[in-house]
Amino acid sequence: MSVTIRRAVLQDLPDIIAIEEASFSSPWSHQSLRAEFDNRVARYYVLEGEDGTVAAYADLWLIADEGQLANIAVHPSARGLGYGETLLRTAMEAVFHDGCRSVFLEVRLSNAAAIALYEKLGYEKTAIRKGYYSQPVEDAYIMNCTKENYRWLRHLL
Ligand SMILES: CC(C)(COP(=O)(O)OP(=O)(O)OC[C@H]1O[C@@H](n2cnc3c(N)ncnc32)[C@H](O)[C@@H]1OP(=O)(O)O)[C@@H](O)C(=O)NCCC(=O)NCCS
């Protein structure tokens, strides 16, 4: 797999919007996706696939020593190629390197693909947020991955 992962720049916004809107029933607004470029705690990444086009993005916040995966999505045409895992590992390893002790996230109970990805990397379900999502209304798992539980921790040592 030959991919490039880099910090997003403003010129990536149309691709990020397209991936977001193809991926979620209730996507973030254009304004919210734009605002992340000015969010000082946000680390916005894009992944360019083999053909050089932006195929995925991730947005991970680091506040003091706590990380939160705000969003991750792979374009539907590029799923199942390892892009989501590669991107999330890169984003997590960067914050762990910078002092993060754990990363948490919310995910729909029905989102089996994302849950499998998170569990593969060492996330555990820690709580349920009732009615967290809309369109359709659904509960969220809160999942957490401590640095110690991160599956690829040895890469960081
Ligand atoms: C979740 C998502 C980011 C995964 O990205 P991806 O590039 O397709 O996933 P990868 O190819 O990197 O797969 C990595 C692991 O994820 C899991 N996985 C991915 N797709 C899966 C599927 N359809 N069913 C079950 N597990 C799946 C597997 O554990 C897989 O590891 P394996 O290949 O060793 O079995 C992608 O499906 C997506 O963008 N979904 C829509 C947006 C979304 O739900 N984001 C998460 C919001 S919380």
Image (cartoon, helix red, strand yellow):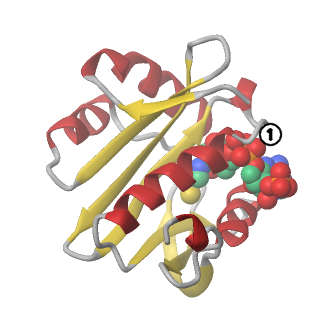
Given residues 130 and 86, the one toward you in this image is 86
Q: Is mark 1 within 8 Å of ligand 1?
A: yes
Q: Is residue 53 above or below residue 148?
A: above
Instruction: Give the residue type at disc 1.
Output: Gly
Given residues 112 and 97, the one toward you in this image is 97
Q: Residue furthest bottom?
A: 126
Q: Position of residue 96 (x, y in %)?
A: 39, 68
Regarding residue 135, the answer to whether it shows in the image is: no
* Residue drawn at (65%, 11%) of the image: 51
Q: Position of residue 23 (x, y in %)?
A: 60, 37
* Residue drawn at (25%, 31%) of the image: 34
* Residue drawn at (50%, 68%) of the image: 106
Q: Is residue 60 above or below residue 27?
A: below
Given residues 63 and 30, the one toward you in this image is 63
Is residue 38 toward the left or the right of residue 14 in the image? left
Q: Dot 1: what SS?
A: loop
Q: Is residue 55 above or below residue 95?
A: above
Quadrant of the image occupied by residue 127: bottom right
Q: Position of residue 88 (x, y in %)?
A: 54, 52
Q: Around disc 1, counting alpha carbons within 10 Å, would you say few (fewer than 14), some (14 to 19), or many (20 or more)?
A: few
Is residue 99 toward the left or the right of residue 35 in the image? right
Q: Residue furthest front?
A: 157
* Residue drawn at (70%, 60%) of the image: 117
Is residue 67 toward the left or the right of residue 151 in the image? left
Image quarter of the N terminus: top right
Which residue is tagged 1?
80
Q: Position of residue 115 (x, y in %)?
A: 69, 65
Q: Is residue 32 above or below residue 146?
A: above
Quadrant of the image occupied by residue 64: bottom left
Regarding residue 104, the answer to whether it shows in the image is: yes
